[in-house]
Image (cartoon, coloured by chain):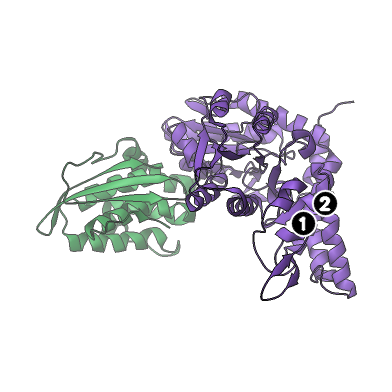
Chain colours: A purple, B green
Amino acid sequence: MNSTLQQIDIEKFRKDFPILQQKVHGKPLVYLDNAATSQTPKIVIDAIQEYYLKYNSNVHRGVHRLSQLASEAYEETREIVQDFLNANSVQEVIFTKGTTDGINLLASSIGRGLIREGDEIIISAMEHHSNIVPWQIMCEDRGAKLRVIPINDDGEIIFEAFEGLLNERTKLVSIVHTSNSLGTVNPLREIIDLAHKKGVPVLVDGAQAVPHTKIDVQDLDCDFFVFSGHKVYGPTGVGVLYGKKAWLEKLPPYQGGGDMILNVTFEKTKFNELPYKFEAGTPNIADVIGLGVALNYVQKIGYDKISAWENELMWYARNRLQEIDGLRFIGNAKHRAGAISFVIENVHPHDIGTILDREGIAVRTGHHCTQPVMQRFKVPATTRASFAFYNTKEEIDQLINALHKVIEFFA
Amino acid sequence: MIDELRELYQEVILDHNKNPKNYFHMENPTHSAEGHNPLCGDQVEVFLNVEGDVITNISFQGHGCAISKAASSVMTTVLKGKTIAEAKEWFNRYQHLVTSDMGEVVDFDAFGQLAVFAGVREFPMRVKCASLSWHTMLQALENKNEVASTE
């Protein structure tokens, strides 16, 4: 038995994604911008359409048939997510708009509930802006301090520096699982173990992890975990915040409104129980249902196979990219997933992006919402190719051919 | 290589990218401003020396793609010796050039060196690259102490 995907499997799976069948500028689309957003299989699109065609209705409110169907489908997704993350209970699964929304929810709630003047929050130097700015806003508001774990020249966190930053004022560690711009996979078990020894909870930004690797929040023992639907073959505008029940019970609600209450008078409101305490207002019902279908889809393929195939693609691409004159990788962590960032001497990433686009190849160019990472490596921007299980080695060959053309053009 | 790409990256643009004109930090300019394209992180600083009404010297520094660097370089060569009113008029004409419809006939002679940027029209994502230094120049002349932005 081979545990990785074979060419024949990939060809079959690619048919599940109608968008991949098209041509761009007359060339077959080579989609290597999966870290920005992954493509959506037809069954997810169908599920969303079916909701609007057949049972569009508000959840947790009506006694009528449609509302009952919508509520069931919505809550069924919560069970799918619980299973997907191996959470202890459905009460630990909060639906959000996405990773950014999840982090903002926690920053606001933890800020009001736990943080006092002089307290400290630890993040790392490879965080996405979404795991920097919400903490900066909260720290400024509460008189707290943001501390940053530095990274080495390979783009890995410096663990000893993390040990040095942890102290009795530390109230939370918020760290990315897999870096969107460097592709680094962080040693989360070690980070979480050490933080817990000091009694500090850990939030994991899993946006770039969930498409590539099996997540088990109980095994990781993280206190909070956030991810987005659209990076794991689901729709945009929906995401998940997982939190250990004990923490979620302790924290104050984020937004107020309908659905998150048990009883409202003008004097006092009694908040609803978990998870509804954190889900004010009518949620994104259709996309939550779509997310459930997407998570079932990837689980059916199997993470062992997905991870093995993507790892093969990753190292095949790294090897082939070395052929390109003047190419330098930004991020050389050995433990990596998803993305490869690089710069080419004397050619700006935007010019690379434009030429690749004309070859039908979609990559991301820019700072990838990680400006501190760009500053750390003293580059204004990079070109990033990022993979999904539906990518092939032939597509990587096309990327390499196109990059040879770039060099020729700007030589 | 595809024709539109040749149209976008004309030899003149590639040359200016490799060897930009007036690429230096000016000491004591009468006007200067910084421009950012927050989308891509491009950054440019434009310096002008204005005597009376005339731009006697103009230079730039920063980092950006070939289009943005060449646009800055050509802009400085075009605007040197022009009056402020002329510079503003060129700004408007150039903006029109890079954003006009592909169907619109361009009077290439009237645009001189700037005509090479007509190819940008085919690439809407790159218009900002071609415009950043021009916006920054305008900002400097208007002496607004704000960072110019293409957003």
Kindly identify which numbered label has been placed on residue A238.
none
A131 or B82, nearer to the observer: A131
A63 or A114, nearer to the observer: A114
Subunit of mark 1?
A
| Quadrant of the rendered image containing residue A84 | top right
Residue at horizontal 70 percent and vertical 64 percent from the top? A280
Which residue does the numbered mark 2 point to in the structure image? A90
Say whether residue A58 is left or right of residue A405: right
Q: Position of residue B39 (x, y in %)?
A: 47, 50
Which residue does the numbered mark 1 point to in the structure image? A275
Q: Is residue B116 visible in this depiction of the protein?
A: no
Mark 1 falls on what kind of element? loop
Q: Position of residue B84 (x, y in %)?
A: 18, 60
**Marks 1 and 2 close (CB-CB < 8 Å):** yes
Which residue type does callout 1 highlight?
Pro
| Quadrant of the rendered image containing residue A83 | top right
Q: Position of residue A114 (x, y in %)?
A: 61, 49
Q: Which residue is situated farthest in the left direction here? A: B52
Mark 2 falls on what kind of element? helix
Q: Is residue B130 above or below residue A189?
A: below
A103 or B54, nearer to the observer: A103
| Quadrant of the rendered image containing residue B150 | bottom left
Residue at horizontal 82 percent and vertical 41 percent from the top? A86
